[in-house]
Image (cartoon, rainbow, N blue to C red):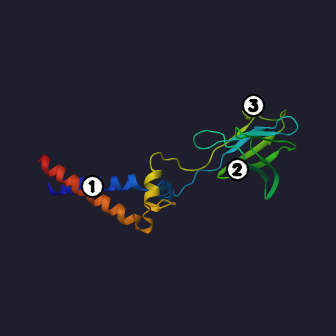
Amino acid sequence: MRLKQFITGAAVALSTFGLLLPPEAIAHAADAVSGVRQAAVTIDLALGQGGTIRGQVVNQDAIGKADTIVSIRQGDREVARTVTDDSGAFAVTGLKSGVYVVASGKSAALVRAWNSNAAPPSAAEGILLVPNELTVRGQERVHDLLHGNGHHLGLGKHGIGALLVVGVIGTIIALSIDDDAS
């Protein structure tokens, strides 16, 4: 009976702790456990008239990001730079067939650009740049509370202590509920 109570309490404490972790910690833990990062995917893109690459930069909610810088690189050399319009759309002309990295902030894509007459049938006509960040809904306020981020309630370096206190309280509640059920 005591072993069951201990396991139940430990499970409640660990799940409480897991809910309070910031999204970055969860992402880094997943990378550390798997040891594998997702490989870069090359996008086949048909160049438009005049060697044009068209695309859109959006945030994690699929809303276009206005006035965002988009850089197009070939190797170590930046071959073009532009700024998105009000809807996050951009277009760069004068490019030739080749491999490019199209980047904007935390968004980047490896693009194999083709002349329209040589492009494979599966080639896209535009590119969508989305930030490469972990999206976890509902945890931002807890993260701000534990780490400050400019808020007056921030616990700063004492955040781990607060998590431990919450875990202990959760364990006590779980054990008392289990005692009441017996």
Q: Mark 1 belongs to which amino acid?
A: Gly
Q: Nearer the viewer, mark 3 or mark 2?
A: 2
The single residue placed furthest to the front in the displayed view is 152
Q: Earlier in the sequence, mark 2 or mark 1?
A: 2
Q: Residue furthest top?
A: 121
- The relative height of residue 81 versus residue 168 in the rendered view (above or below) is above
Residue at 36 percent of width and 56 percent of height: 17
- The x, y position of residue 49, in whole percent, is 86, 34
Q: Mark 2 and 1 residues: CB-CB less than 8 Å, in contact?
A: no
Q: Nearer the N terminus, badge 1 or badge 3?
A: 3
Alpha carbon of mark 3 to alpha carbon of mark 2: how far?
27 Å
| Cα distance between the residues tagged 1 and 3 | 57 Å
Which amino acid is tagged 3?
Answer: Pro
Q: Are marks 3 and 2 in contact (CB under 8 Å)?
A: no
Task: Measure the C-alpha gap from mark 2 to mark 1.
Answer: 43 Å
| Residue at image coords 83%, 35% | 48
Residue receiving disc 3: 121
The residue positioned farthest toward the bottom in the image shown: 157
- Residue 104, horizontal then vertical, whole percent: 70, 50
For label 2, the residue is 104
Is 11 on the left-hand or right-hand side of 37? left
- Name the residue that disc number 1 marks: 170
Question: Which amino acid lies under the numbered mark 2 shown in the image of this protein?
Answer: Ser
